[in-house]
Structure formats: structure tokens, C-alpha cells
Amino acid sequence: MRRREFIALLGGSAVAWPFKARAQQLTMPVIGFLGYWESPKSIAGSLVAFHQGLAEAGFVEGRNLAIEYRWGDFRYNSHG
């Protein structure tokens, strides 16, 4: 390989590298689950159905989806 061809090849790879790295940095979607219940134990069956519905749509918690859970302890307002 001649010197100019080598430099052109190296330069082209260096230019494409940042774009390739950015394309691979996909963010995982996050769902917020807000319940007024005391804990997940009180609605265990509903959570199973919720996860099954997500799985049918192709989402699995921890693999391609994150879920943030918050529990309200039966409080309807933020003032306790």
C-alpha cells in the first residue's frame, strides 16, 4: 500500500469514528410508575399484568427498558 492511500484510509476512518460511536450510544427508555398504594405487594397481580403487557410490546425491564417506581402510601396529595 502506498503512503497516500494509507493516509487517506486512516483519515477516512478517523472522520467516521465519532459518528459511529454516537450511533451506538442509544438511551434506554424509562417509564415512571406512580401508585398511591402502600407498596408493590398490594398490587402484585396488576404489576404482573403490567409487565406482561410490556413484554408483548417487546419491552423487558432491565434489558431494553427501565422502570422507576414510586409509592404514595395511600396519600393523594403532597402535603401528607
Image (spheres, helix red, strand yellow):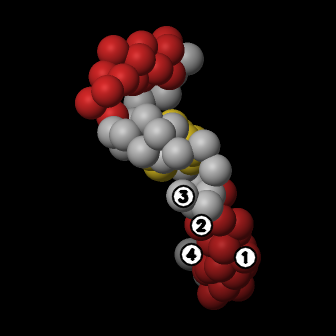
Count how many numbered circles sit on residues in the image: 4
The answer to whether the residues at label 4 and label 3 have Cβ atoms under 8 Å apart is no
Q: Which residue is mark 3?
A: 80
Q: Earlier in the sequence, mark 1 or mark 3?
A: 1
Q: Residue at x 37, y 40 (%)?
A: 38
Q: Secondary structure at mark 1?
A: helix
Q: Which residue is mark 2?
A: 21
Q: Earlier in the sequence, mark 4 or mark 2?
A: 4
Q: Position of residue 22 (x, y in %)?
A: 65, 65
Q: Which residue is mark 1?
A: 15
Q: In the picture shown, does residue 39 fall above or below 51?
A: below
Q: Which mark is residue 1?
A: 4
Q: Position of residue 56 (x, y in %)?
A: 49, 12
Corner quadrant of residue 62: top left
Residue type at mark 3?
Gly
Q: Earlier in the sequence, mark 4 or mark 1?
A: 4
Q: In the picture shown, does residue 55 fall above or below 70?
A: above
Horizontally, residue 77 falls left or right of residue 61, namely right
Q: Marks 1 and 3, Cα distance to the nearest angstrom?
A: 56 Å
Q: Earlier in the sequence, mark 3 or mark 2?
A: 2
Q: Position of residue 78 (x, y in %)?
A: 62, 58
Q: Earlier in the sequence, mark 2 or mark 1?
A: 1
Corner quadrant of residue 37: top left
Q: Nearer the viewer, mark 4 or mark 3?
A: 3
Q: Marks 3 and 2, Cα distance to the nearest angstrom?
A: 47 Å
**Residue 9, can we see it?**
no
Q: Marks 2 and 1, Cα distance to the nearest angstrom?
A: 11 Å
Q: Residues within 10 Å of mark 4 (few under 14, many from 20)?
A: few
